[in-house]
Image (cartoon, rainbow, N blue to C red):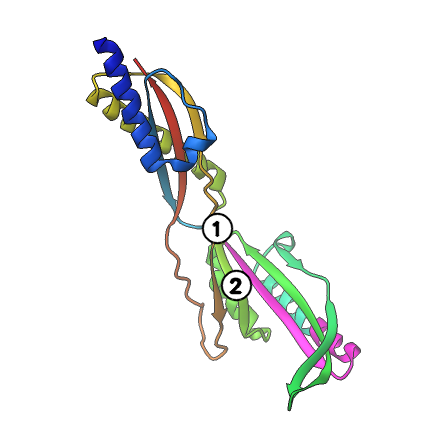
Amino acid sequence: MMKNAKSLILNCAAAFVLSAALPIFAHAATLPEAPHVVVAARGEVEAMPDIARLQLQISETQDSAVKAKSAVDQRSAQVLNAVAEQGVPERDIRASQIRIYPDYEWHDGKRVLRGQRVERSIDITLTDLSRYGGVLDALVNAGISELGNVSFDLSQRETLQAEAVQAAIADAKARAEVLAAGFGRKLAGVYHIDEGANAPVVYERAMMMDAKVGGAAPMLIGKETVSASLTVVFLLK
């Protein structure tokens, strides 16, 4: 009778942890009838980003699409040449197809045609961040005054994600062992594992570039945290 009472207490305790901290998991998985404990764990790994992605858009509005396209083509060529001169491989430069559409503005409540607008986007990936400042200066010299977004990422994200998962596993074990020991029990094995979704965080920011500023443009970035979360059901003995 006493043994059954202890089992009931352990199950109630685990159910409390489950319902208080893990309401979603309670509906997503079937819990065992045997004594068990449910823990939520998290692992984190920090690393410095080593990839930069630059997005810029070249646009022009003229009274004809031919004139606007000619201007965009000329500026695009200047940008592509400038970036290539900085040692950026061709495979890391992607220029989109040209878009052409009417450009309107409003005057006294009426829509007035300004002309034909031509746009082209260029994406640049830097796998060597030592080129960052030189590339920005080259873009300024090529007539680019604003970048749409500058984002930083990790080339070894999958490896770092695996390390974060291992850290979460260790955290889950440690938490479960403490809870089990508190009830005079030990872990008997794993019944269920639920891995939470951890979307990668890519830091982005818009950037205005001042053509009057000489020298390499500063790059201020910090460490990125790669995380993993687990919900684990451990059996007790």
Residue 198 image-quadrant placement: top left
Which residue occupies the extreme top position in the image? 1
Which residue occupies the extreme bottom position in the image? 108
Q: Horizontally, is 156 left or right of 236 in the view?
A: right
Disc assigned to residue 153? 1
Magenta segment, which residues?
51-73
Indicate whether 120 appears above or below 17: below
Q: Quadrant of the C terminus?
A: top left
Q: Residue at x 45, y 32 (%)?
A: 27
Q: Residue 28: image x %, image y %?
A: 47, 31
Q: Amino acid at mark 1?
A: Asp
Q: Residue 168: image x %, image y %?
A: 36, 33
Q: Which residue is mark 2?
A: 149
Residue 142 or residue 121, whichever sits in front? 121
Q: Residue at x 52, y 63 (%)?
A: 149
Indicate whether 193 appears above or below 48: above
Q: Amino acid at mark 2?
A: Asn
Q: Is residue 171 visible?
A: no
Residue 165 image-quadrant placement: top left
Q: Residue at x 33, y 37 (%)?
A: 21
Indicate whether 92 appears above or below 218: above
Q: Is residue 169 visible?
A: yes
Q: Horizontally, is 124 left or right of 155 in the view?
A: right
Residue 42 or residue 223, whichever sits in front? 42
The answer to the question of whether label 2 and label 1 lie on touching residues, with beta carbons closer than 8 A, is: no
